[in-house]
Amino acid sequence: MSLCVVGDFAWDVLIRTNNEVLKGGDSFGEVLLHPGGSAANVAVWARRCGIDTHFIGKIGRDRLGDLAREDLEREGVIHHFIQTDAHLTGSVAVFVDQTGERSMVSGRGADFFLLPQELPKSVINRADYLHLTAWSFFTDPPRTAARFAAEIARASNKLISFDPASFQMIEQMGVATFWSYIKDLGIKVFLPNYEEGRVLTNLLEPADIAAALATQLTDATIILKLDADGALVHHNGMQTVIAPATNNLVDATGAGDSFAGAYLAHFAKHANVVEAAQFATRIAAWVIEHIGARPGSDATLGRVIAAN
């Protein structure tokens, strides 16, 4: 089995403080540069968890673009980068507060300018799964390219998974507009977090949110990520609560991406939605106990992945 991920590669400028930052004030903390981008993070975690993974995205012809290629090669992800002189490789400012919660400001780098004619169709056709994130849908480009990727995958009955990415961006776009861009994609796995589910349904209870999302995407498995409360799987009309694996939040950056990559890797191997969600919860739990979206592996993570 193989996975193709289409979307953003960006560098995270991670800023972490141990105290509240006051307006006009100064503070010590950590300022780190990490590889990121929601789609690229999913690709890396899927590969780490054992599935052959291809990544399609756009980067600048600059040093950060060179480093992006080196990063995915080091991770074992087969990349199909489109390079441009017109835009710089993407970057994102990630602010992590003293509680571990994160806020992001995304620049509009090369990843936002992917065009349909630039997609390597054969790569999408050869893969068994296609993953997309809503960061490819909030503006156009790259929306048309992402929709074209889904069209290619749907024509040969690939499994398409989708992460809605940002409750704030969905609110700014408008819920009805957002649905109009994604309901016809043929999504089979939908991976919102609680806030995204709440915004998309205007409901508060996780069980109600998952059921309402299932009525919008009638052929999809809904996996509602609930952070410290684990996850909720809605599949074939039945709901299963997935218990949390940790409550030790250090940095929430990339938790949802690691969940998606781990889920797809496990499902590709075992075809069991509940067991895949349980495995993904354990991977995401390890991630939030470390700094950054893709922390280096340790013995604990190795044991979790080995159990896949």
Image (spheres, rainbow, N blue to C red):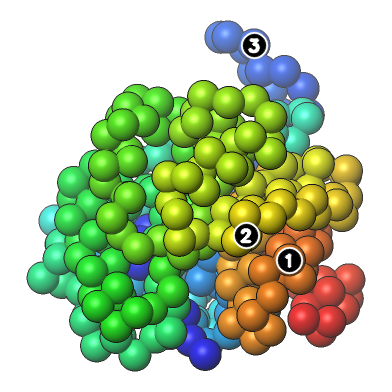
Q: Position of residue 156 (x, y in %)?
A: 29, 83
Q: Are marks 1 and 3 in contact (CB under 8 Å)?
A: no
Looking at the picture, does residue 99 appear above or below residue 85? above
The mark that comes first in sequence, 1 or 2, is: 2
Mark number, residue 235: 2
| Secondary-structure class at tag 3 | loop
Q: Residues within 10 Å of mark 2 (few under 14, many from 20)?
A: some
For the C terminus, give its image quadrant.
bottom right
| Secondary-structure class at tag 1 | helix
Looking at the picture, does residue 199 appear above or below residue 234? above
Q: Nearer the viewer, residue 305 or 63?
A: 305
Marks 1 and 3: which is nearer the front?
Answer: 1
Label 3 belongs to which residue? Answer: 22
Q: Quadrant of residue 76?
A: bottom right
The kind of residue on which mark 1 rests is: Val
Q: Position of residue 258 (x, y in %)?
A: 63, 61
Q: Are marks 2 and 3 in contact (CB under 8 Å)?
A: no
The mark that comes first in sequence, 2 or 3, is: 3
In space, the residues marked 1 and 2 are separated at their CA atoms by 9 Å
Q: Position of residue 26 (x, y in %)?
A: 64, 18
The mark that comes first in sequence, 1 or 3, is: 3
Q: Residue at x 24, y 78 (%)?
A: 155
Label 1 belongs to which residue? Answer: 274
Q: Quadrant of residue 5?
A: bottom left
Number of numbered discs present?
3
